[in-house]
Amino acid sequence: MNIAYVYPGQGSQYVGMGKDLYDEYPVVKNLYEIANKTLDFELTKVCFGGPEEQLKQTYITQPAIFTHSLAITELIKPRFKVFCTAGHSLGEYTALVASGSLSFEDGLKLVKIRGEEMQKAGTINKGTMAAVIGLDSGLVEEACKEASENGVVQVANFNSPGQVVISGSVEGVKQAMQLAKQKGAKLVKELVVHGAFHSPLMEPARERLKQALNNASFSRVQIPVYRNVDAKPTMPETETAEIRDSLYQQLTSSVRWEESVGNMVNDGVSEFIELGPGKVLQGLIKRITPSVMTRGFDKTTDLKQ
């Protein structure tokens, strides 16, 4: 049985995440202490005690989910032989650490910069995002293309069959929402977000992220990591320049999650294990390919099953 680790992105956070792991396992406590020293704020304080509004700030959310996911990875590593890995948006950085391409500290520094710059870009270029449910992804892309006369809009996340997220300027997204309804979407819902993620409106974030990626110490992956931008695997023979470029492009490109999961299954994966807060990816994977096994590890109780 081939197992894939998968890592969640922004939106899976909750107040109290990681506290039970921190209290029980010294290796987890050590990771959080490193995070506290690396970041400009006390991660443990916000993760464990909130307030929720603060935890939802992009520059805090991203390091919070990244650290929690890798803490739980440390604890279950001895139990499973992993075939490959992938992550949704932010989760791709987590997957690269899990694959041996980045150290925890280097990954955290990159995620810190990515979160800060995405938050700033969301302030500079006001935008929004919306979920489109129950409409073929090709028709959603069509709606975005037609609406782009009103403003920037594109597919941000191809999540699963019938679940697509669009992103861009307020005018562009609103128009695409209307067109998606006309084309037969069951539900179109604007999301509460701090920016138009995975759209050209993230352009202001790219320069500082590019510098950080160029300065970070990457190694070749030890297991395949399926990329968001093209759903293809970064292999142990792949040059590190390709990894940097993929992460750079990811900021303004669509997350091809449905395709990534399909490719992993075609390449032999039969079980997906989600590591980190929540169960979002398990739900998406079940919709993409119902025949595979899914499970997740988030809390200490999950580890004891």
Image (spheres, grey):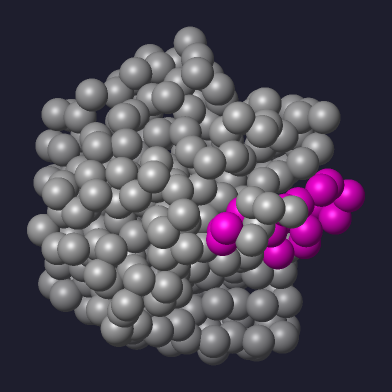
Q: Is residue 92 visible?
A: no
In the picture provided, is 262 more to the left or to the right than 157? right
Q: Residue 137's spot in the image, x, y percent? A: 65, 63
Of residues 226 and 101, the one drawn nearer to the viewer in this rendering: 101
Q: Quadrant of residue 200?
A: bottom left
Of residues 209 and 7, the one drawn nearer to the viewer in this rendering: 7
Is 298 in the magenta?
yes
In the picture provided, is 111 more to the left or to the right than 90? left
Of residues 143 and 155, the one drawn nearer to the viewer in this rendering: 155
Q: Which residues are magenta?
A: 281-300
Q: Quadrant of residue 154?
A: bottom left
Classify 168 as above or below 192: above
Q: Is residue 246 visible?
A: yes
Q: Residue 249's spot in the image, x, y percent? A: 34, 42
In the picture provided, is 259 more to the left or to the right than 171? right
Q: In percent of the image, x 29 and y 83: which residue is there?
A: 51
Looking at the rendered image, the quarter that the N terminus falls into is: top right
Q: Residue 265's spot in the image, x, y percent? A: 76, 37
Q: How many marks?
A: 0
Q: Residue 127's spot in the image, x, y percent? A: 29, 77
Is 49 in the magenta?
no
Classify 102 as above or below 162: above
List the single residue furthest toward the top.
237
Classify 151 as above or below 284: below
Q: In percent of the image, x 14 and y 29: which residue is there?
A: 215
Looking at the rendered image, the quarter that the C terminus falls into is: bottom right
Q: In percent of the image, x 47 and y 63: which residue is there?
A: 20
Q: In percent of the image, x 25 and y 70: which residue is there?
A: 45
